[in-house]
Image: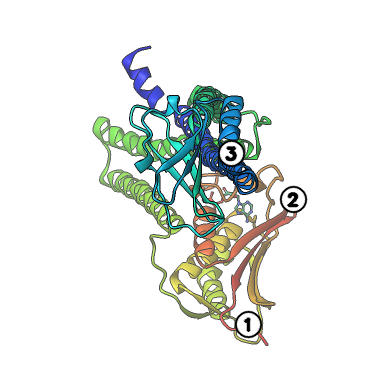
Amino acid sequence: MSSKKKNSFFKTLTLRLTLWYAGLFGVLGLAVFLVVYFSLSANLKERSDKQLLHLATAVESLYDTHGTRAVLAEFQREAHSRGIGRVFFRLLTPRGTTLGTSDMSPWGGLKAGDLPTLKLTAGGVVFRTISIPGDQNKVRVITKRTANGNVIQVGTTLGDNNLLLEKYRETFGTALSILLICGGFVGWLMARRAMSGVQRVSRAASRIGKNDLDLRVAVGNEGQEIDDLARAFNEMLARIEKLVRELKDVSDNIAHDLRSPITRIRGIAETTLTGKQGIGEYQEMAAAVVGESDRLVEMINTMLEIAQTDSGVTELSLKPVDMRQIIDDAADLFLPLAEDKDLDLETSVASAPLIVLGDRAKIQRVIANLLDNAIKFTPAGGKVMVSARADDAEATIMVEDTGPGIPAHDLPHIFGRFYRCDKSRSTPGNGLGLSLALALVHAHNGDITVTSSPGRGSTFTVSLPLDTPPS
Ligand code: ADP
């Protein structure tokens, strides 16, 4: 493994999840161990105490009924049957003097003074845990006072309990190690499984180059989150693909639309350089250069305006605007143009004010672009009609014409930048008018739609929210 790969392996989520799982298993195992260990040791102690109390009570009642000799004989019998190294019995005076014991040879370190000779009331008991020098196991001792004031002591080594606890510790230690290894392995498997979807999406994503934007990541069955990730990624890819396609179209169009006027300007300049022209021809050529340059500047300005309006950079100077006024002004402005083309220009506006909160100049620009198109594309003898009315909470402005109409396959594209249905570009224009109109109307929270029947004309409908909707 190269050091770079090693480094990135240590940063992987898979490793982190594996460690988390192993850690979790470890902590849980340890918690279980501690709970079981402490309850086991408490249980063992309780069991020892019960046993001691049982023995002490038995020998006490023997002492009470049969006296010292009988009880001392019982000490020997009981100690031998249970194991002299496991249990001892003693009969002491209240001052601690030994009256008799079981075989104390394994309890060498135990002295009479080690044990409490308590001022117990008859039948009273006390439990103590004591250490014997030279013996690593502690001793649990019950001290019980008999009816005549003497004291019976029964002691038992805690060695058996310790042995059991030690065994338990050993077994659990092994189990915990196995648990940790299993936890780590299970964690690694689960983490790998959980991450496999993410890795699949990321592998697919890295395979998609700039020329394969139509590729998509397969939506698998690794879980809802991974499916959502794949879907979100595919949606993003679709948006990028659309943007790249649009960008390509726009740059193709820009290349074409900028190249044509520049080529024309160059042609004129060449003619002026090569031939000997009269002053009138030079003037004509200079005027043509000015015209072409103006068109270029206008196109660049329009492109900028669309971009700024779309991105929300342009600040609108919003004021109440009466759409009837806008329509009347536009009709006045375009009437001479319509008459020149022998077109009938009609207006029809509502009698009540149609107030829209908008930027007057921008709204005028929208209506002018639509009217300009209608007049430009409608042949002589045709008709252009502009109307404005209130529709619920909206002002609806319609620009209708009896022109050639727009082919159905062009309709979805005509608001795109530089799009022109006439591929021969025989009519003047740059294909930016409708884009700008749409951007401006969107900036006013409105919309533009178009319907058209080829051969019979087109209708562009602008809807803008009314400032004071009619009650
Ligand atoms: P331009 O008019 O400068 O070409 P526009 O963006 O205003 O650009 O219009 C885009 C295209 O939509 C036009 O080139 C034309 O083909 C079509 N179009 C727009 N308005 C009309 C109309 N009223 N009648 C027929 N075609 C139209």
Per the image, the residue denoted by label 2 is 455
| Contact between labelled residues 1 and 3, with CB atoms less than 8 Å apart | no
Per the image, the residue denoted by label 1 is 469
Residue 45 at what x, y percent from top left? 54, 41
Above-or-below relation of 5 to 78: above
Above-or-below relation of 364 to 265: below
Real-space Cα separation, disc 3 to disc 2, in angstroms: 130 Å
Q: Is residue 295 left or right of residue 410?
A: left
- The foreground one among 27 and 363 is 27
Real-space Cα separation, disc 2 to disc 1, in angstroms: 37 Å
Mark with earlier residue (2, 1): 2
Q: Quadrant of the N terminus?
A: top left
Mark with earlier residue (3, 1): 3
Per the image, the residue denoted by label 3 is 71
- The foreground one among 395 and 38 is 38
Q: Please, what secondary structure does the residue beneath circle 1 have?
A: loop
Q: Residue at x 70, y 59 (%)?
A: 402
Rendered image: mark on residue 386: none
The answer to which image quadrant residue 193 occupies is: top right
In the displayed orientation, state which residue is furthest to the top.
1
**Colour mapping:** rainbow
